[in-house]
Amino acid sequence: MSLEPERTPKRSANIFINYRREDSAGHAGRLFDRLSSHFPGRVFMDIDTIEPGVDFVEVIENAVGSCEVLIVVIGREWLRLKDAAGRRRLDDPQDFVRLEVAMALERDIRVVPVLVEDAPMPRTEDLPPDLAKLARRNAIELSDARWTFDADRLIQTIESVLRDKAPSALLPAAPAPSQPATVRETMRLRPWMALAALVALIAAGWIGWRLMRQPAPAAPQKVEEVASAGPPPVASPVVPEPQPAPAASPEQQPTPDPQPQPPDYGPDTCKQGFVWREARPEDHVCVTPDIREQTAQDNAQADARRDPAGGPYGPDTCLQGYVWRDAYEGDHVCVTPETREQARLDNSKAGERKMKSMVRWTKSLLKVHGRSG
């Protein structure tokens, strides 16, 4: 990400992640996602690409100066990485990582070392003089086996710092101006009133239709006609001729089967045009059919996309060019970065793609009406 001095974030970016791409890019990116979901718009990283002609020291000063917490992600190669000349990067006074950490320590910003891949905490004698204080900072270890637990501990630490130094960073956005109570109630009830009127209209039409199909009762015979007729004449028994079977009345005609209705899967029923993703059997996030098919293909290719030699993430380490899908907690299926971003987008839209309960109830009523007709 390219930054200019005037575009450097102000106090809205309270958390700065410092890391080396060759050492811990995967862990830093995963940590960025976790912190961004908890502190939206307040996490900042990646200033190592600075436009030509811009004073990079000024850019770093502005970026680091805008934060309350600086997280230093330290992997197993953090101390030993060298430049093209064979010199250790930390020994270069203009190294971005060194500059960021040194400025944070100088400005008394809370610096939190985060150890990944079982990396040890650097010792004072291993660090340049301007980073010596880093060795005295208490570190937090992020383990792949207990990532959620460790990340939550880090979030609690950050919340404590922001609460003391920047309380406004933890406040929710200001609510919109309130409307009068009667107007709010009317606007809230209006959709339900319209839906209730629609259901009542459907029910009234169904009842009227049933009443119209019932046959009229036979008219009673007048008493005078019965009395004037006198006793019936005695006649010899006559064998009745066989009569043709009466035609079936409309009520007795077989009713054709109602048109099939879309199945109701309860609260996880998707809207028209969406299906369950099924990244695992209980994954009921609603996606397009194309995404569901892509998910099934990714699951089938999971083993082929893992590094057979293992790696920093153990047996789930992906081959170059692939990342964990993270469609759910613990989803380590290796996919392209674009597919992972699509999974994150689908998760964020899961609620709005499911059918509301009142709509499902109305469709069920129509289904019952079709059967009884």
Image (cartoon, helix red, strand yellow):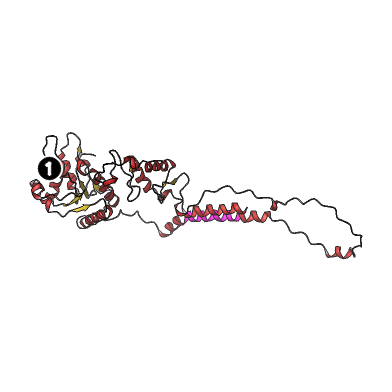
- Tell me where residue 74 appears, x and y as whole percent: 18, 47
* 218 and 257: which is toward the camera: 257
Q: Residues within 10 Å of mark 1 (few under 14, many from 20)?
A: many
Q: Quarter-wise, where is residue 274 in the image? A: top left
* In magenta segment, residue 196: yes
Disc 1 on helix, strand or loop? helix
Q: Relative to residue 143, is residue 217 drawn left or right?
A: right
Residue that numbered label 1 is attached to: 90
- Tell me where residue 347 appears, x and y as whole percent: 37, 48
Residue at the far front: name it: 309
Query: Magenta-highlighted stretch: main secondary structure?
Result: helix
Residue range highlighted in magenta:
189-204
- Tell me where residue 162 appears, x and y as whole percent: 22, 55
* 321 and 299: which is toward the camera: 299
Q: Relative to residue 103, is residue 366 drawn left or right?
A: right
**In what quadrant of the picture does the N terminus appear?**
top left
Which amino acid, by three-letter code, is at mark 1? Leu
> What residue sits 82% from the left and 63% below the top?
222
Number of numbered tags placed on the structure image: 1
Q: Relative to residue 323, is residue 121 drawn left or right?
A: left
Q: Relative to residue 231, is residue 9 drawn left or right?
A: left
- Tell me where residue 341 appears, x and y as whole percent: 33, 43
* In magenta segment, residue 21: no
